[in-house]
Amino acid sequence: MDWQSFVTPATPPFFSGATVAIFVAVILWSLVWKGMALWKAAQKGGKVWFVVLLLVNTVGILDILYLYVFSRKSSQPLEAPRM
């Protein structure tokens, strides 16, 4: 054994090709869903939802729930105000 093996420990190959591919796939998956959810929240005027979706990263889970569950609750057409 030489002295360098004691000074610098061996680093495991964490960033192998498969790990990088999975990491990139998860990022792309999350960006697609986050973009769709943010677009819909902005169109509907949901400022609170927009901020929550922008700040909370759940790998697309909250974004999918917003698109298919929460944004459908208020899908009733708005009535014109009576004067």
Image: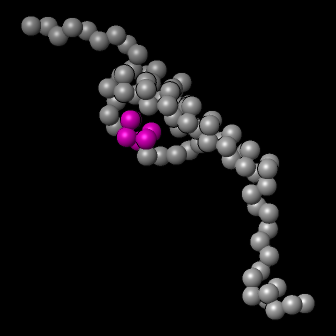
Q: Is residue 80 positioned above or below 25 on the image?
A: above
Q: Residue furthest left?
A: 83
> Magenta residues, as a range?
49-54
| Residue 83, position as x, y percentages in the image | 9, 7
Residue 70 visible in the displayed image:
no
> Residue 21, relative to residue 64: is it above or below?
below
**Colour mapping:** one colour
Q: Quarter of the image holding residue 61? A: top right
Q: Is residue 53 magenta?
A: yes
Looking at the image, which residue is at 80% across and 48% down? 18
Query: In terms of depth relative to the viewer, which is nearer, 73 or 17?
Result: 17
Q: Is residue 72 above or below residue 22?
A: above
Q: Residue at x 76, y 61 (%)?
A: 14
Q: Residue at x 55, y 31 (%)?
A: 33
On the image, the x and y values in percent for residue 66 come to 49, 30
Displayed quadrant of residue 75:
top left
* Residue 29 appears left or right of 45: right
Percent position of residue 25, x then y: 69, 39
Main SS, magenta region, reads helix
Between 3 and 73, the one nearer to me in the picture: 3
User: Which quadrant of the figure contains the N terminus?
Assistant: bottom right
Residue 18 lies in the magenta-colored region: no
Residue in the foreground of this view, choosing between 54 and 52: 54
- Is 82 placed above or below 61 here? above
Query: Is residue 81 among what the camera can see?
Result: yes
Q: Is residue 71 left or right of residue 4?
A: left
Name the residue rendered at 36%, 22% in the picture. 44
* Horizontal relation, residue 74 to residue 82: left or right: right
Identify which residue, 66 or 57, lies in the foreground: 57
